[in-house]
């Protein structure tokens, strides 16, 4: 229906999460009709990022330098490592302003059904870090899905074997949340993770 270049642009935009054929078509036409300069900036930024951004050699987050800015910061506590599933999770924890340690990004979670084992998400590298001196605690911040919980248990077993303290972030009722609107699974997890006041 469209010219080959426009079809290619629409097809390329569909690789983004949550972008279907109609959304991709709308974005492509908007860029070509109303945002030519923005389209050029977007193309340049994508090209630069694709060429220069890679995984930090220490924490595996995405960065154009290695070590990344977080790992290179001498004020951060290298003895405390927070394990997350994705670079987006690093950003979420950083925005909380409450964590001053280092990170380890898995880029996924264990899923034997999908053929994703420990080495596929870098758990072998994390286990090596556990065996090095100077690591006091690992905070597991994987998502509370079945795969995230399996990943958390795997990490906990390996940390205990390496005599490294391991903890899990709490999941449950959000601040300002009302119990009547909380789903049963979240409420059950909050009850089982209760702590003494």
Image (cartoon, rainbow, N blue to C red):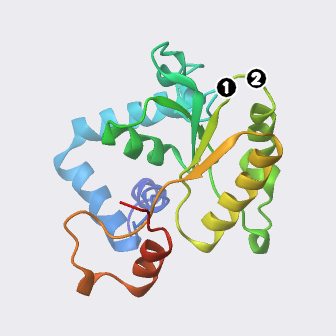
Name the spot of residue 24 as percent of width and height, x first. Answer: 36, 64
Which mark sits nearer the N-terminus, 1 or 2?
Answer: 1
Reading the image, the residue beneath label 1 is: 57
Name the spot of residue 76 as percent of width and height, x first. Answer: 48, 21
Residue 159's image quarter? top right
In this rendering, would 126 be left or right of 42? right
Secondary element at tag 2: loop
Name the spot of residue 17 as percent of width and height, x first. Answer: 45, 62
For the C terminus, which image quadrant? bottom left
User: Which label sits on residue 133?
Assistant: 2
Q: How many marks?
A: 2
Q: Is residue 170 above or below residue 37?
A: below
Residue 124's image quarter? top right
Q: Is residue 110 above or below residue 50?
A: below
Give the residue displayed 19% in from the left and 52% down from the top.
33
For the N terminus, which image quadrant? bottom left
Give the residue displayed 75% in from the left and 70% down from the top.
114
In this rendering, would 26 be left or right of 176? right
* Pointer 1 local density, CA inside 10 Å: few below 14, some 14–19, many at least 20: some
Label 1 to label 2: alpha-carbon separation: 18 Å
Secondary element at tag 1: loop
* Residue 58 or residue 8, whichever sits in front: 58
């Amino acid at each position: 229906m469209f010219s080959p270049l426009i079809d290619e642009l629409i097809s390329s935009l569909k690789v983004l999460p949550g972008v279907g054929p109609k959304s991709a078509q709308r974005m492509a036409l908007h860029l070509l009709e109303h945002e030519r300069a923005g389209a050029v900036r977007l193309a340049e930024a994508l090209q630069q990022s694709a060429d220069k951004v890679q995984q930090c050699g220490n924490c595996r987050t995405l960065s154009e330098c290695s070590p990344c800015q977080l790992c290179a910061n001498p004020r951060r506590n290298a003895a405390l490592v927070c394990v997350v599933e994705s670079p987006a999770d690093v950003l979420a924890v950083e925005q909380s302003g409450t964590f001053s340690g280092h990170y380890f990004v898995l880029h996924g979670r264990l899923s034997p059904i999908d053929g994703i084992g420990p080495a596929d998400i870098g758990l072998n590298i994390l286990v090596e870090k556990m065996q090095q001196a100077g690591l006091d605690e690992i905070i597991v911040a994987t998502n509370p899905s079945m795969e995230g919980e399996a990943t958390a248990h795997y990490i906990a077993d390996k940390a205990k074997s390496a005599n490294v303290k391991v903890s899990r972030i709490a999941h449950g009722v959000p601040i300002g949340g009302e119990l009547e609107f909380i789903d049963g699974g979240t409420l059950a997890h909050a009850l089982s993770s209760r702590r003494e006041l």
